[in-house]
Amino acid sequence: MQVGFYFDQTRCTGCNACQVTCKDANDIPAGPENWLRLGYQEEGQTPDLLVAYLFSPCWQCVSPVCADACPAGAISKRADNGIVVVDRAACLGRETCGEKCLKACPYGAPQFGPQPDAKMAKCNFCLPLWEKGGKPACVEACPTRALDAGPLAEMQARYGQASQAMGFKYSQRTQPAVVFKPKTPTR
Amino acid sequence: MGDEKVRVVRATSAFDCGGRCPLRLHVKGNRIVRVEGDDADESKDLQLRTCLRCRAYRQYIHHPERLTEPQKRVGPKGAGEFAPISWDQALDTLAGQLKRAKEKYGPESILLMTGAGYLGSLYMAALAGQRLMNQFGGYTTHYGNISSEGAVWASLTQYGSVMVGNSREDLMNSKLVIIWGWDPARMISGTNTMYHLIRAKENGSRMISVEPRYTDTAAVLADQWIPINPGTDPAMMVAMAYVMISEDLHDCGFLDKYTVGFARFADYVMGKEDGIAKTPGWAEAICGVPADTITALAREYAGSKPAALMDCQGPARSQMGEQYNRCAMTLCAMTGNVGKPGGSAGGGLMGIPIAHMFRMPGIPPGKNPAEQGGPRIAGTLDIRDRVTKRIHINKLWDAILEGRAGGYPADIKIAWSMGNNYLNQTGNANKGAKALASLEFFCVNELFMTAQARYADLLLPVTSAAERSDFTRPWPSGPYFCFSNRAIEPVGECKSDLEICGHLAERLGLPEFNPFTEEGILRTFWEKSPDLSEHIKDFEEFKRKGVHRVKLAKPIVAFQKQIADPENHPFDTPSGKIEIYSQRVADMNKPDCPPIPKYLPVSEGVEDPLKEQYPLQLLTPHPKNRVHSEMYKVEWLREVDPHRVWIHPEDASARAIADGDMVHVFNGRGRLAITAWVTQRIKPGVVSIFEGAWYQPDANGVDQGACANTLTRDEYSGGGAAVLNTSLVQIAKA
């Protein structure tokens, strides 16, 4: 089974509740380590504008190129749910390794704290919650219900197959596990 | 320690926020370790989902900069240099100062600054302080609220009521929603309001945003954005009325049956009163909206039934701001949308009667001996009566600096503040700093070393809402009631304002002050408060669940009864009708309060010649990542939305300002340093700084904290609106 996210870009107000929740749920201090990021696009000219936000976690890719790039074998993909996990004890550290995972990832998912030679950390789909039958904390935090998560096949059955959104490019190479309702530049 | 069990406590925050959201606080020892939201089953009840602010609640409660012990000033006033003292020393000092001022200068020399820093029934700073000081012999305090005074005055004038909102589910019935100066994606005007709007849009409602900024609300909802100059909303609305009257699009039957004074308003609109026809072309020159756009919106609004014109409170925080809400309400009547499902009454307050903040029970404050003998103020629309014995909230600084000689009710010698940060949150912070530094003594009850706390002589550390149990509710109602259970014991030596007042009462010889216990008084509130006891039958169950939802058979629509059955349900106005012309206002004979809604030019408005020197209009909207100035220190919130001034590329390039540059924004009142955000999302000629960042003047007087109120005016409009969105500024690279 492969898990995946659903993101309704038309509902996202860019409020950052998902990001703050991610930090609370995973006990991450303010600073450079952001398991969840929010992309921003602004197009057009006053008064004909299009503004879109992009929810950006780790997409738990079907082919995680970060795992291939890791010289220490610290990144692996779980067979039971497809969640890409990091063995932080095995990670060589940011400077020692040279951020090979981050350089490989087209989505900037691998993250490092501020300390020297920080070990990589990233969104793990809130694995502990998932294993207890829950969803990632960000999903239930969204005030406008723009997020969902579950088995990718279920997300596709419920929400369709759209794999593009403003500010997002689907990588055939890594196959991110996501379904979108994209915002469309109509004007 | 590691083995300590995690308890889950059902609570809410008590910030001065328009939402109120059930939280599940995970507590380990005396520490909140995680915040979860409402866990209602969404297939039965919509979850009351909290926003980013309370997602970061634990970082606020346990912030390393929380004040945890009483402190006295040891450096110059305003320098923020303090040394810890004991509670006994602190309370003796404050009691001594209160007695000294009362004996030497009279009780009115004591300024009590209350506020909305925590909105609970029991732990409401204003009520505890007022009760104590009333029993002590009196004090001087302030009148009005910074947020909504314009909208309150306008709604009372036009409808005789402040309950002008429909429940949010009713938006699903609207064919057209005009979002006029309203940004619920950031300013939570009722939990889930933005979600209801999104559902209405997905249901097919067309949505139009009229506002100087392309807000996040507009970005998600608006089919059309109409950028408008700040403070000119009445001009555009009056021109829309011109189009409707000219093209006979208005609902004459509705106006005849339910309103008074429309003919006089029409005379003004059509130019019969002053010789100026308020055409879209006339309005274009003022508000910067093309005449064709105004005409099209007027036709669309008149032709889409039902349609909800959603005005709010921000544009009313302007000179003549009351006219924005009055014009909006008048358009709602002209289109026959008042009292109808899918329509709106306007008025900007958006509240419904069940579980409304204004109906929250509280401890009885009693009467202020220093206010005896003043004019009768209950229900008055004449602000002059309200400031005979009190100080307008946006005039605190002049009142302190000028006293009776300046026409204020007292010569203020000492002040005591609880639940507010007015230095930061009312107009003209530089003047405020001078005023606070001039006091003989200033005591501040606070959780943090705020901009205002720095000017204290004595600091008393206060508990947060997580450290006490209370009833809480959102500003405009849900409709639901919340109970916030105490999650942790007080941090450090913190005490609630009520406890602090209780200890002072002992020192001041006032045994009557606090006969309450927390448990007992909360139960009494439940028993005695009509809306609580009507809806909540089992108090213990309510406490356990932390929230009680009121099930509505159908959405509440303001004034539905008055419209369906006007014979038996008159409006609460002297005429019993919607007063487009108000005789009460006419009788006041004040030029800044016209009896019919009007556009009038104002100082530091778009037509002021001062624009040659300060060409940009400044907006100071609500931030999304703090509640006004509360939560300012919370790092999880600071990092997601850096404090920046919005500026249009045209205005930026004319000043060689690039995105990310450090700039100075300034006018005759002050100068602040801030990063520029160059964006198409703001009308040329307008700049915007979110309110609430803490004022922090450097040695040269430049506010490095970039508090918006360093630039705003300490004035109020005819109906009492604080004019925090009527300021002209200039910008230059730092």
Image (cartoon, coloured by chain):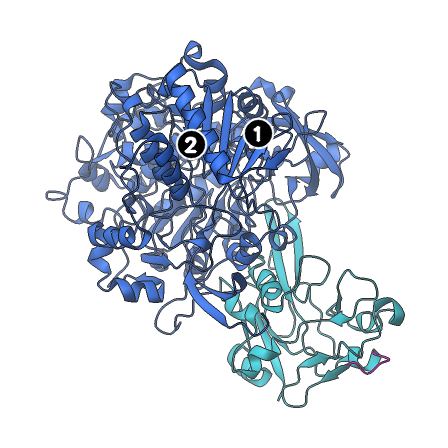
Chain colours: A cyan, B blue
| Residue at far top of view | B405
Is residue B418 within the magenta segment?
no
Which range is magenta?
A: A70-74
Label 1 CA crowd tier, 10 Å (few <14, some 14–19, many 20+)? many
Location of mark 2 (residue): B234
Label 2 element class: helix
Q: Which residue is drawn at 84% across and 69% down?
A: A99
From the top left corner, tell me how far across and down residue B262 is, in percent.
Answer: 26, 31
Depth check, front residue: A24 or B6: B6
Chain letter, disc 1 residue: B
Q: Position of residue B492 (x, y in %)?
A: 53, 50
For disc 1, the marked residue is: B455
What residue lies at 35% left-to-right and 30% top-to-bottom? B508
The answer to whether residue A82 is visible is yes
Chain letter behind tag 2: B
- x and y percentages locating residue B60 in the rendered image: 55, 52
Mark identifier at residue B354:
none
